[in-house]
């Protein structure tokens, strides 16, 4: 499985970005798909995940109400719409995947990782 993340860039605080993660899988809903992020000098942290045929989601508290995860099962792509961005959202964002339908927030739970895309939010 290969994951290709894209969509990062430089944005002012309060702005928006949409990240994409294209997955080389046959059936996207057979995987738990997640976004993690790693800020400079910090550990990688969980942001949000989507899983199951119904598209269940789970958000880390600091992004609730601002970020929205979605997926296009036809295009095998997961999206992360990020609104009301804050400087503390600055990080490299990674998409990750694991076969199955049980959500996980730990980095070690995920088997496949994309290369990361940098998001910089200026104040």
Image (cartoon, rainbow, N blue to C red):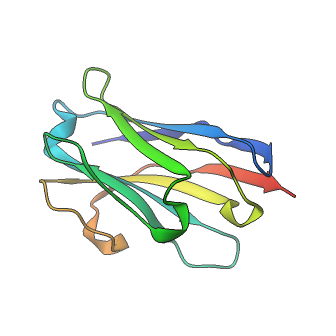
Q: Position of residue 110 (x, y in %)?
A: 29, 63
> Residue 13 or 107: which is nearer the viewer?
13
Q: From the image, which quarter does the N terminus lie in?
A: top left
Using the image as rendered, state which of residue 19 and residue 83 is in the foreground: 83
Task: Identify whether 104 is placed above or below 43.
Answer: above
- In the rendered image of this protein, does residue 71 appear above or below residue 118? above
Q: Residue furthest bottom?
A: 42
Question: As displayed, is residue 61 above or below residue 115?
Answer: below
Which quadrant is home to the C terminus? bottom right
Q: Quadrant of residue 15?
A: top right
Kindly give the residue lying farthest to the front in the view shown: 65
Q: Residue furthest top?
A: 74
Can you tell which quarter of the image residue 105 is in?
bottom left
Left or right of 57: which side holds 20?
right
- Whether residue 122 is visible here, answered yes or no, is yes
The mark tally for this picture is 0
Left or right for 33, reference 113 = left
Could you tell whether 80 is left or right of 102 in the image?
Answer: right
Seen as rendered, the residue at the extreme right is 123
Q: Residue at x 26, y 68 (%)?
A: 104
Q: Is residue 115 visible?
A: no
Residue in the picture at 15% in, 46% down:
52
Residue 27 location, x and y as percent? Answer: 16, 32
Camera-side residue: 67 or 1?
Answer: 67
Q: Position of residue 42 (x, y in %)?
A: 63, 79
Quarter of the image holding residue 26? top left
**Residue 68 percent coordinates (x, y):** 46, 45
Q: Residue at x 52, y 50 (%)?
A: 67
The answer to whether residue 108 is left or right of residue 123 is left
Q: Residue at x 23, y 43 (%)?
A: 55
């Amino acid at each position: 499985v290969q994951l290709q993340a894209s969509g990062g860039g430089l944005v002012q605080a309060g702005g928006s970005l949409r990240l994409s993660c294209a997955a080389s899988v046959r059936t996207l809903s057979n995987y738990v798909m997640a976004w993690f992020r790693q800020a400079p000098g910090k550990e990688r942290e969980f942001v949000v995940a989507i899983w199951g045929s119904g598209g269940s989601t789970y958000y880390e508290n600091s992004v609730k109400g601002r970020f929205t995860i979605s997926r296009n099962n036809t295009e095998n792509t997961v999206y992360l719409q990020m609104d009301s961005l804050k400087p503390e959202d600055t990080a490299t964002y990674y998409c990750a995947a694991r076969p199955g339908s049980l959500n996980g927030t730990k980095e070690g739970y995920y088997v496949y990782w994309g290369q990361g895309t940098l998001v910089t939010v200026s104040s």
